[in-house]
């Protein structure tokens, strides 16, 4: 037997798969398989460049203030 991974594109697809399973034509092994995505890939391009640069400057400033207070 071959195992394949599919992505459902409509809600009706799962119903169809269950019907095929009842006919013993296939077997559904897992309902959800999550693929691990790097956070940098997941959030890439979510902030405008100017906001990201301001945030980075703020983080650096906060770290410097923290280091100076220790």
Image (cartoon, rainbow, N blue to C red):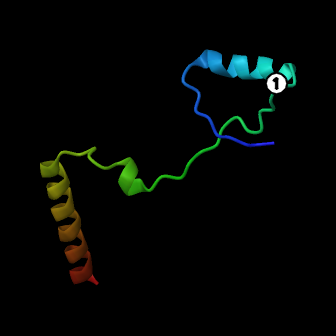
If the image is split into quadrants, where does the N terminus sit? Answer: top right
Q: 13 and 2: which one is in front?
A: 2
Q: Position of residue 21 (x, y in %)?
A: 82, 24
The residue at 79%/17% (across/down) is: 19
Instruction: Name, please, the residue furthest toward the left.
Output: 50
The residue at 60%/18% (across/down) is: 11
Residue 30, quarter of the rendered image: top right
Looking at the image, residue 14 sits to the left or right of residue 56; the answer is right
Q: 46 and 62: which one is in front?
A: 46
The residue at 68%/40% (across/down) is: 4
If the image is split into quadrants, where does the C terminus sit? Answer: bottom left
Residue 61, quarter of the rendered image: bottom left
Looking at the image, residue 46 sits to the left or right of residue 15; the answer is left
In this rendering, the count of numbered labels is 1
Residue 58, quarter of the rendered image: bottom left
Q: Please give the residue where the numbered disc 1 appears in the rendered image.
A: 21
Q: Position of residue 59 (x, y in %)?
A: 23, 65
The residue at 41%/55% (across/down) is: 39
Q: Position of residue 60 (x, y in %)?
A: 20, 69
Q: 49 and 55: which one is in front?
A: 49
Q: Position of residue 31 (x, y in %)?
A: 70, 34
Q: In terms of secondary structure, where does tag 1 sit?
A: helix
């Amino acid at each position: 037997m071959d195992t394949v991974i599919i992505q459902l594109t409509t809600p009706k697809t799962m119903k169809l798969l269950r019907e095929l399973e009842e006919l013993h034509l296939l077997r559904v092994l897992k309902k959800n398989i999550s693929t691990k995505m790097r956070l940098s890939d997941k959030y890439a391009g979510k902030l405008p460049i100017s906001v990201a640069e301001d945030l980075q400057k703020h983080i650096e400033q906060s770290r410097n203030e923290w280091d100076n207070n220790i």
